[in-house]
Image (cartoon, rainbow, N blue to C red):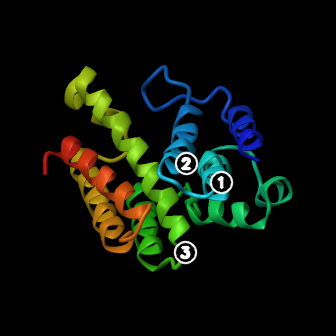
């Protein structure tokens, strides 16, 4: 199922690019799935990591994910998908924060944490090559991004207290400190 998920992600994200870069977007979901495997998460969680942006950023449907990858994977992907991308950035991010504060399934938090870790690593690399101009790629300014990531780091540290989540959360926090200088 891992290889099928990788192939599916590559196909669905074909032609998409990381914001303001020449980096194929598919590297992000592949990195997320790999981070989950690297930290000892079950294959099903890694599969959801590989597919985590398919509902949000491609023409993929929940039914399609359910059919190809099973109920659990489809549900996990739904849990890390923003419900309405037409909403303003702050509304969407507040929804994500509240959802991650309440969600009971630790696997959802693991996927969200790996997603944020990869995003932060990409931002860190962008800062090394482009300086503060990297923030011009995003819909929200640096202070809003700092609020969002700082809030998520608090949630991950409070809620991911056993392995593999504790190590993943600590690693994400370390990169967040490098990015935001806190």
Query: Who's the residue at 65% across and 26% down the image?
Result: 15
Q: Which of the pair 135/2 is nearer the observer?
A: 2
Query: Who's the residue at 62% across and 45% down the image?
Result: 50
Mark 2 nearby-residue class (10 Å; few <14, some 14–19, many ≥20): some
Q: Position of residue 141 (x, y in %)?
A: 27, 45
Q: Which residue is mark 1?
A: 43
**Camera-side mark, 2 or 3:** 2
- Is disc 2 in contact with disc 1, using a CB cutoff of under 8 Å? yes
Quarter of the image for residue 12 reads top right
Q: Position of residue 86 (x, y in %)?
A: 55, 55
Mark 3 nearby-residue class (10 Å; few <14, some 14–19, many ≥20): few
Callout 3 secondary element: loop
The disc at residue 26 is none
For marks 2 and 3, the one nearer the N-term is 2
The disc at residue 37 is 2
Q: Which of the pair 130/169 is nearer the observer?
A: 169
The disc at residue 105 is 3
Q: Which of the pair 91/50 is nearer the observer?
A: 50
Q: Alpha carbon of mark 2 to alpha carbon of mark 1: how far?
A: 7 Å
Query: Who's the residue at 37% across and 34% down the image?
Result: 122
Q: Which of the pair 161/115 is nearer the observer?
A: 161
Q: In screen coordinates, is 29 left or right of 149? A: right
For marks 2 and 1, the one nearer the N-term is 2
Q: In screen coordinates, is 61 left or right of 99? A: right
Callout 1 secondary element: helix
Is 180 above or below relative to 147? above
Is residue 59 at least partly visible in the picture?
yes
Callout 2 secondary element: helix
Q: Position of residue 147 (x, y in %)?
A: 25, 59
Q: Alpha carbon of mark 1 to alpha carbon of mark 3: how far?
A: 16 Å
For marks 1 and 3, the one nearer the N-term is 1
Is 122 above or below relative to 156? above
């Amino acid at each position: 199922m891992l290889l099928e998920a990788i192939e599916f992600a590559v196909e669905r994200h074909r032609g998409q690019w990381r914001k303001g870069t020449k980096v194929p977007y598919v590297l992000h979901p592949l990195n997320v799935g790999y981070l989950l495997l690297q930290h000892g998460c079950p294959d099903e969680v890694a599969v959801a990591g590989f597919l985590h942006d398919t509902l949000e950023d491609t023409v993929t449907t929940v039914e399609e994910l359910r059919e190809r990858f099973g109920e659990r994977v489809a549900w996990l992907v739904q849990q890390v998908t923003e419900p309405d991308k037409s909403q303003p950035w702050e509304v969407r991010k507040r929804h994500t924060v509240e959802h991650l504060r309440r969600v009971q399934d630790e696997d959802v938090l693991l996927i969200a944490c790996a997603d944020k870790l990869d995003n932060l690593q990409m931002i860190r690399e962008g800062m090394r090559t482009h300086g503060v101009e990297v923030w011009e790629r995003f819909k929200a300014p640096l202070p809003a991004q700092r609020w969002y990531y700082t809030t998520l780091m608090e949630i991950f540290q409070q809620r991911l207290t056993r392995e593999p989540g504790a190590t993943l959360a600590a690693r994400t926090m370390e990169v967040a400190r490098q990015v935001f200088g806190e």
